[in-house]
């Protein structure tokens, strides 16, 4: 039952992510002065309630356990400060996210606390990783929101801090570093799910192709042939039905999103960069330039005079150009490397624990 409740809470967190984004945007629009006070109050209240509840439970080994709680809080605060963007609203919204994953660590720790061995710590970490991968993939999948491995790392740090806090507040009745047979089976299954989930996330979000043509190089989720096919398809589709309205609860058009990466880089770059990014757009993302959208009612193509001026400004720079437009890393190693590594981990876990393929028993 505890596992069902923890999984349900995790699913609710993942599926609520798009709606939380909409709620935040609505609050910013309707009451911009309230957004930051509300978010700060939520974070402080949740952390304060957790600290008070934890301190009230502690009756033994107070120095050690108080120290662990303090260390968890200090690590969370330090990481939040190190990764801060300087934009208060963005940073405090991330701190809400951090607290959420601390709670995810707590609920999964309660599931496996009674194991009495090291798996009561490792299993919640793996479960938190799976939840983080699911949520960040969903945020990558839908429009406007962004998910990448850096965000998964933030979630995992939050899980680790929440786990230290949880163990300090309510340590297991007995503990051994030696992992029992039942715990090894759980670790094999949950670890395999985490390995497959991580491989799937990297495959979907971070793997792509280096496109090289006429002194230009950039990275895309698509190979050159697929980019050409998508350009033809979007030109035909958008002629009849241009993307004038942003549907936040829909699938992100990754082709359009990539085109907008280069538009932003072009519009904010110096002369040589702007001209090279425009060449990439004209060659590979022409429908993004020509189609009115929710981003620009007139499209993004330069007027002839502006284009001629940009070409003249960059005329003296003939060096090969490598675009840095992508907002997160896109790697070009073969997919079979990634999935082979995941397969080896899964197979190795099963053989080591069972001598055969593991059965999915994680209770």
Image (spheres, rainbow, N blue to C red):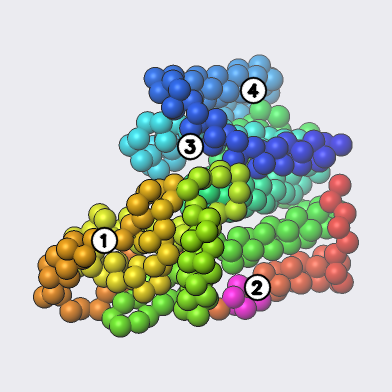
Q: Residue furthest front?
A: 240
Q: Which residue is identified by label 4?
A: 54
Q: Position of residue 192 (x, y in %)?
A: 73, 62
| Callout 2–callout 3 Cβ contact below 8 Å | no
Q: Earlier in the sequence, mark 1 or mark 4?
A: 4
Res 196 quadrant in image: bottom right
Residue depth check, mark 1 versus mark 4: number of the one nearer the observer:
1
Per the image, the residue denoted by label 2 is 339
**Residue positioned 40% across, 43% down in the render:** 83
**Residue 339 is covered by the magenta coloring:** yes
Is 356 displayed left or right of 295 in the figure? right
Q: Label 2 neighbourhood size at 10 Å, few (<14), some (14-19), many (20+)?
A: some
Front tag of 1 and 3: 1
Of residues 251 and 118, the one drawn nearer to the viewer in this rendering: 251
- Any part of residue 271 in sight: no
State the CA–CA distance, disc 2 to disc 4.
Answer: 42 Å
Q: How many numbered marks, from 0 up?
A: 4
Secondary structure of residue under mark 2: helix
First reached walking from the N terminus: tag 1 or tag 2: 1
Who's the residue at 81% across and 54% down the image?
186
User: Which quadrant holds residue 5?
Assistant: top right
Q: Give, as a single range, the part of the protein colored magenta.
A: 335-340
Check disc 1 and report the residue beneath it.
302
The image quadrant where one finds the N terminus is top right
Q: Determine the residue located farthest toward the bottom in the rendered image.
A: 214
- List the residue tagged with mark 3: 94
Q: Earlier in the sequence, mark 3 or mark 4?
A: 4
What distance separates the C-alpha of mark 1 from that of mark 4?
Answer: 60 Å
Q: Is residue 213 rendered to the left or right of residue 173? A: left
């Amino acid at each position: 039952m505890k596992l069902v409740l923890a999984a349900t809470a995790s699913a609710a967190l993942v599926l609520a992510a798009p709606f939380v984004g909409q709620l935040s945007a609505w609050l910013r629009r309707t009451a911009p002065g309230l957004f930051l006070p509300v978010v700060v109050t939520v974070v402080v209240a949740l952390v304060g309630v957790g600290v008070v509840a934890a301190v009230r439970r502690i009756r033994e080994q107070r120095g050690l356990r108080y120290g662990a709680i303090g260390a968890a809080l200090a690590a969370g605060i330090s990481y939040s400060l190190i990764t801060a963007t300087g934009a208060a609203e963005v940073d405090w919204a991330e701190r809400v996210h951090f607290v959420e994953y601390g709670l995810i660590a707590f609920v999964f720790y309660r599931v496996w606390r009674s194991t009495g061995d090291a798996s009561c710590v490792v299993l919640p970490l793996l479960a938190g990783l799976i939840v983080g991968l699911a949520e960040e993939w969903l945020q990558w999948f839908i429009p406007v929101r962004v998910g990448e491995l850096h965000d998964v790392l933030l979630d995992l740090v939050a899980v680790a801090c929440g786990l230290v806090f949880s163990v300090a507040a309510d340590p297991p009745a007995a503990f051994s570093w030696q992992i029992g047979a039942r715990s090894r089976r759980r670790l094999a299954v949950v670890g395999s799910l985490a390995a497959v989930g991580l491989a799937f996330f990297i495959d979907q979000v971070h793997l792509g192709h280096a496109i090289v043509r006429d002194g230009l190089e950039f990275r895309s989720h698509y190979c050159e042939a697929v980019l050409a096919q998508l350009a033809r398809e979007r030109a035909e589709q958008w002629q009849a039905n241009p993307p004038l309205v942003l549907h936040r609860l829909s699938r992100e058009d990754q082709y359009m999103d990539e085109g907008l990466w280069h538009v932003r880089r072009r519009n904010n770059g110096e002369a040589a960069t702007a001209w090279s990014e425009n060449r990439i757009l004209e060659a590979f993302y022409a429908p993004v330039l020509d189609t009115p959208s929710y981003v620009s009612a007139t499209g993004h193509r330069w007027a002839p005079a502006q284009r001629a001026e940009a070409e003249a400004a960059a005329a003296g720079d003939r060096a090969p150009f490598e675009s840095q437009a992508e907002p997160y890393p896109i790697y070009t190693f073969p997919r079979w490397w990634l999935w082979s590594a995941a397969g080896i981990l899964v197979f190795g876990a099963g053989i080591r624990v069972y001598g055969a393929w593991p059965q999915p028993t994680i209770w």
